[in-house]
Image (tube, rainbow, N blue to C red):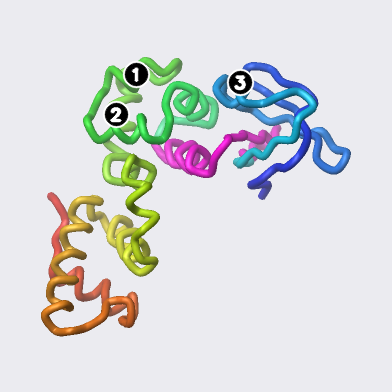
Amino acid sequence: MISLLNGVVRSIQTDKAVIEVGGVGLSVSITHHTSAQLNLGAPAQLFTSLVVREDSLTLFGFLDEESRSTFELVQTVSGIGPKVALAIMGAHSPQSLALAITQEDIKGIEKVPGIGRKGAQRLILELKGKISDFGTSDHERTHQPVWREQLTSALVSLGFTAKDSDAAINKVLAEYSEEGVDPSSSDLSDLLKRTLQTGRRSS
């Protein structure tokens, strides 16, 4: 899988760029925002996602890893393919999309070409609780211990919302503090077991 390109920009259009890497020109589908940040003949780095179809291989490129991850995540929603996902990324940053989903802002999402009201509702329904990983809390998350990020990820995959997992982890931290135990010295499996006993998922 091609996940990163470092090369020279040989062609730019509003929806496509050709990046020369090692003498080979790779065509990459991009948003108009990405297009505006590229300069002809200048070096560029794009985080890419390769979409494989029976009759095609298409590279989609983004300026940062967060945008690529969001692009891949929205495609997990039923009925949303790479073209609509790219349109979503053209209309929203990962942060603004996370905010629109959290606030259930259907109008803010349905303005994306090709998604419509039903698609916006489905996006909110299927991604609420998952998209927070790419939301505005990123700056805070980078200062969290690795074990806490891993534990949060495990809880979210088990159906917890980001809010519920935070509350459950904080309860366990309070218990560990009373017992004089350092959570970073505990196994992740023990932490998960303890947190599952303490926390509960929203219904």
Badge nearest the viewer, 2 or 1: 2
Left or right: where 47 falls relative to 100: right
Left or right: where 151 falls relative to 3: left
| Residue visible at 35% across and 61% down in the picture | 149
Magenta residue check for 70: yes
C-alpha span from label 1 to label 3:
24 Å
Q: In the rendered structure, find residue 36 and report the number of the disc placed on it.
A: 3
Q: Residue 76: percent from the left, percent from the top?
A: 43, 41
Q: Give the amino acid type for the residue marked by disc 1 in the picture.
A: Glu
Q: Residues within 10 Å of mark 1 (few under 14, many from 20)?
A: some
Of labels 2 and 3, earlier in sequence is 3
Q: Which residues are magenta?
A: 51-77
Badge nearest the viewer, 2 or 3: 3
Q: Residue 110: percent from the left, percent from the top?
A: 34, 18
Q: Residue 67: percent from the left, percent from the top?
A: 49, 37
Q: Give the amino acid type for the residue marked by disc 3 in the picture.
A: Ala
Query: What residue is pinned by disc 1?
Result: 110
Examine the rendered structure and indicate whether residue 162 appears above or below residue 48: below
* Disc 1 element: helix
Badge nearest the viewer, 1 or 3: 3
Q: Residues within 10 Å of mark 3 (few under 14, many from 20)?
A: few
C-alpha span from label 2 to label 3:
24 Å
Query: What residue is pinned by disc 2?
Result: 100
Q: Nearer the viewer, residue 55 or 113?
A: 113
| Residue visible at 45% across and 30% down in the picture | 80
Farthest-out residue, right: 23
| Residue visible at 20% across and 70% down in the picture | 195
C-alpha span from label 2 to label 1:
11 Å
The answer to whether marks 1 and 3 mark residues whose Cβ atoms lie closer than 8 Å is no
Magenta residue check for 184: no
Of labels 2 and 1, earlier in sequence is 2
Q: In the rendered structure, find residue 193 and report the number of the disc placed on it.
A: none
